C-alpha cells in the first residue's frame, strides 16, 4: 500500500503549523512547563487542519532559500502574534500586582512555578483567575479563532506588508 501526497499543499500545511506552534510557545497558558512540547506540536498540527482548506491556493516557494525564508517568516509572525496575546495576560497580572501594592501585600513575593518567575500573591491569583475565566467563558475559542483568521490576512508563503 502506497500513500502519495502532493508536495505544495503539504508544505503549506507544515508552514501553517510552524506559525501556530510559535504562537503556542509564547502564549501564557500554553507556554508553561505544564503543557509538554509534544502536546504543543500535536495541537499545532490539529489547528493547522482547521485552516487547511484556505491553504490550497497558497503559493509556497519550493527552493531551499525561499523555503527557509518562509519558515522564518512564519515563526516570526507566530511569535509576534503570541507576544500580542501574552500582553493581555501581563496586563491582568499587573493589575493584580497593583492590588498587592495598594493593599500592602507587595512584600509577600511568591514564586510562580508555571511561569518560572517571582510574582505577588494577588498578581498570580488574578492571572490564574483570568485564565480560568477565559476557558470557562469560551474566550479561548475567540483567541484561537483570531489566530486562525490571521491566515486570511497574511497567507502562508507571503511576507507581511508593513504600511
Image (tube, rainbow, N blue to C red):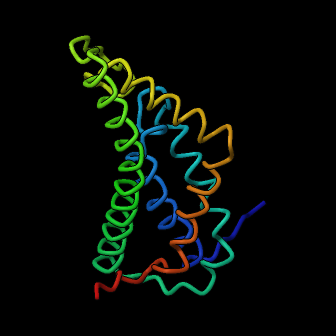
The quarter of the displayed image where residue 13 is located: bottom right
Residue 42 x/y as whole percent: 58, 45
Q: Which quadrant of the rendered structure holds the C terminus?
A: bottom left
Compared to 125, does 17 lie above or below? Answer: below
Compared to 24, does 156 lie above or below? Answer: below
Q: Between 145 and 96, which is closer to the camera in this rendering?
A: 96
Horizontally, residue 142 falls left or right of residue 110, namely: right
Residue 74 x/y as whole percent: 39, 68
- Total labels drawn: 0
Name the residue: 51% across, 60% down: 17
Q: Residue furthest top?
A: 108
Name the residue: 35% across, 17% down: 121
Residue 85 x/y as whole percent: 42, 53
Q: Which quadrant of the rendered structure holds the N terminus?
A: bottom right
Q: Residue furthest right?
A: 1
Compared to 58, does 151 lie above or below? Answer: above
Q: Residue furthest front?
A: 102
Compared to 33, does 85 lie above or below? Answer: below
Name the residue: 35% across, 36% down: 95
Name the residue: 60% across, 48% down: 140
Residue 154 x/y as whole percent: 45, 79
Horizontally, residue 117 falls left or right of residue 31, namely: left
The quarter of the displayed image where residue 100 is located: top left
Q: Between 104 and 43, which is closer to the camera in this rendering?
A: 104
Amino acid at each position: 500500500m502506497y500513500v502519495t501526497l502532493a508536495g505544495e499543499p503539504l508544505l503549506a500545511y507544515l508552514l501553517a503549523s510552524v506559525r501556530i506552534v510559535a504562537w503556542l510557545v509564547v502564549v501564557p497558558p500554553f507556554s508553561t512547563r505544564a503543557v509538554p512540547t509534544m502536546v504543543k506540536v500535536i495541537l499545532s498540527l490539529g489547528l493547522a487542519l482547521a485552516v487547511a482548506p484556505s491553504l490550497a491556493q497558497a503559493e509556497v516557494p519550493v527552493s531551499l532559500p525561499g523555503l527557509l525564508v518562509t519558515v522564518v517568516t512564519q515563526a516570526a509572525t507566530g511569535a509576534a502574534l503570541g507576544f500580542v496575546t501574552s500582553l493581555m495576560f501581563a496586563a491582568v497580572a499587573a493589575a493584580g500586582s497593583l492590588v498587592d501594592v495598594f493593599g500592602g501585600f507587595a512584600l509577600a513575593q511568591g514564586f510562580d512555578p508555571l511561569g518560572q518567575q517571582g510574582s505577588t500573591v494577588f498578581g498570580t491569583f488574578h492571572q490564574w483567575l483570568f485564565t480560568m475565566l477565559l476557558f470557562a467563558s469560551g474566550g479561548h475559542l475567540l483567541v484561537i479563532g483570531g489566530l486562525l483568521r490571521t491566515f486570511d490576512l497574511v497567507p502562508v508563503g507571503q511576507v507581511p506588508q508593513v504600511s
